[in-house]
Each structure stands twice: as C-alpha cells, then as structure tokens.
Image (spheres, rainbow, N blue to C red):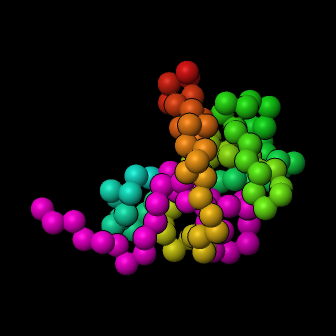
Amino acid sequence: MERRVSAVLMAQFDLYLPARPMRVAYFIDLQTDFLDRLNTVVVAPLVPEELAETREHRKLSPRFTIDGKNHVLEAVHLAAIERKMLGPKVGSLADQRYDILAALDFIFTGI
C-alpha cells in the first residue's frame, strides 16, 4: 500500500485558530499523522484560563502560555471535527506532548 502525502500537512499537537470566531482561542490537533487523509480531525480546545470550565484539575487541564497569555487545554471537550473548521496553523505544542497525553490518559483511564 502506498501512502500519499496530504495536500495540507498537519502534525499532531499543532495549534490552529478556529475558522470562525468562538469562545475557543485555539484548537490542538490530537490525531496521529497517519490519519491525515481523513476529512475529520480529533481536536481539543484551548481557552483563556479565565474561561476554562475545568481549570481546577491540573492533570486533566494543563496550562500553556501562548503569545504571553495563559490558556487551558479542555481535554474533556475533545471532538472530531471537519478540517474546514480549522483556521490557520499558528504554532505547535509538540514539546508539551507529555502533559497533553497525560490529560488524555486521565480521561480514558483515570490515571
């Protein structure tokens, strides 16, 4: 089986602006790069810290400073969305992989 390169390269843990204004400041791509040919992508929102619903639980909702502002990953709101709902890529949190995966592990295993 030959693997084709996607027309739009997306990488796991890349950050995107929403395609239209909303409460969400950013979406983070949580999906493996091997599924980049799908029309959907699994994401979780990052919201400004003051708007976060789950900010009390640090493991479930890790914090990240983006452009000098504190944001919270609301992993409990992860969802599969159409790629067209993503705006431009604005960065990556790949260097924070451990904290992101720990939040996902907590959702699915409680650990």
Task: Place residue 92 in its image quadrant.
Answer: bottom right
Residue visible at 68% across and 75% down?
A: 20
**Residue 56, visible in the rendered structure:** yes
Q: Position of residue 22 (x, y in %)?
A: 74, 66
For the stretch drawn in magenta, the main secondary structure is: loop
Residue lying furthest front in this view? 95
Residue 80 appears in view: no
How many discs mark residues in the rendered view? Answer: 0
Q: Residue at x 49, y 69 (%)?
A: 83
Judging depth in this view, the residue of 18 and 1 nearest the camera is 1
Q: Is residue 107 above or below residue 67?
A: above
- Residue 97 highlighted magenta (yes or no): no
Q: Is residue 38 left or right of residue 46?
A: left
Q: Quadrant of the C terminus?
A: top right
Which image quarter: residue 28?
bottom right
Q: Position of residue 70 (x, y in %)?
A: 81, 50
Q: Position of residue 18 (x, y in %)?
A: 65, 69
Residue 24 is situated, as x and y percent measured from the top left of the image, at: 72, 60
The quarter of the rendered structure image containing the N terminus is bottom left
Q: Is residue 4 above or below residue 110?
A: below
Residue 89 in which image quadrant: bottom right
| Left or right, 6 with reference to 110 | left
Q: Which residues are magenta?
A: 1-30
Residue extending farthest to the bottom is 7
Residue positioned 50% across, 24% down in the render? 109
18 in magenta: yes
Q: Determine the residue located farthest toward the left in the rendered image.
A: 1
Q: Nearer the viewer, residue 86 or 1?
A: 1
Seen as rendered, the residue at the extreme right is 50
Residue at horizontal 74 percent and vertical 43 percent from the top: 63
Q: Is residue 56 above or below residue 71?
A: above
